[in-house]
Image (cartoon, rainbow, N blue to C red):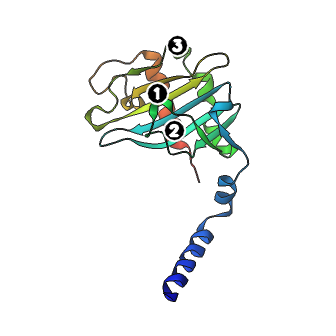
């Protein structure tokens, strides 16, 4: 029994020491944020839907900062999803700063909806959630083929503004590093 306890303590200590100082600082950062308190933000993520929901990293841009989700609850309740996360370094925000200025105004005039066929052929989706000052939160689910072509998996065309934005966002999304 003593050996088991000593082994456990050793493994826990080794795990704590394996975390870099920056990772611990970021995860314990006081710069945490919840979308509930914000007036203007954009949340985006690539979500795998084939064989079950798998939300990879979910990010939020707000007031010149980039945040990463830490809640891990997107797949539990997609319709009621509320971002909760921590601030990433400014170097990561620099990669995405053009996303807000290139955000298609056409989307702002649309209600929440689905584009294409997210999840068809074991694909996924681009998830967008936008809150603009004085307006309600809107969410869009877009077939993930938007990242690399102008049609969904069923060969139905996306609106031009959406395919341009989706391809740009796909490149930006894959460049973000969370430590």
Label 2: element kind: helix
Eye-nearest disc, 1 or 3: 3
Farthest-out residue, bottom: 2
| Residue 119, position as x, y percentages in the image | 32, 33
For marks 2 and 1, the one nearer the N-term is 1
| Residue 20, position as x, y percentages in the image | 64, 64
| Residue 109, position as x, y percentages in the image | 53, 11
For marks 2 and 3, the one nearer the N-term is 3
Label 1: element kind: helix
**Quarter occupied by residue 16:** bottom right
Circles 2, 3 touching at the beta carbon (< 8 Å):
no
Q: Residue at x 42, y 26 (%)?
A: 141
How far apart are labels 2 and 3 at the CA level?
A: 21 Å
Residue at which label 1 appears: 166
Residue at which label 2 appears: 173
**Quarter occupied by residue 13:** bottom right
Taking 110 as reference, is 163 above or below it? below
Residue at which label 3 appears: 106
**Quarter occupied by residue 151:** top left
Which of the pair 131/95 is nearer the observer? 131
Circles 2, 1 touching at the beta carbon (< 8 Å):
no
Badge 2 crowding class, 10 Å Cα cut-off, few under 14, some 14 to 19, many 20 or more, is some
């Amino acid at each position: 029994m003593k050996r088991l306890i000593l082994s456990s303590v050793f493994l826990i200590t080794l795990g704590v020491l394996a975390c870099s100082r920056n990772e611990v600082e970021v995860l314990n950062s006081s710069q945490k944020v919840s979308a509930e308190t914000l007036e203007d933000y954009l949340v985006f993520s690539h979500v795998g839907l084939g064989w079950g929901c798998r939300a990879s990293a979910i990010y939020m841009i707000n007031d010149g900062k980039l945040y990463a989700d830490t809640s891990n609850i997107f797949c539990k309740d997609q319709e009621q999803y509320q971002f909760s996360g921590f601030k990433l370094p400014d170097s990561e925000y620099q990669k995405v700063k053009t996303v807000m200025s290139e955000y298609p105004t056409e989307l702002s005039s649309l209600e929440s909806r689905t584009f294409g066929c997210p999840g068809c052929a074991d694909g996924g989706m681009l998830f967008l959630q936008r809150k603009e000052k004085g307006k309600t939160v809107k969410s869009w689910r877009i077939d993930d083929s938007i990242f690399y072509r102008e049609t969904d998996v069923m060969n139905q065309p996306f609106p031009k503004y959406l395919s341009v934005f989706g391809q740009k966002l796909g490149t930006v999304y894959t460049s973000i590093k969370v430590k």
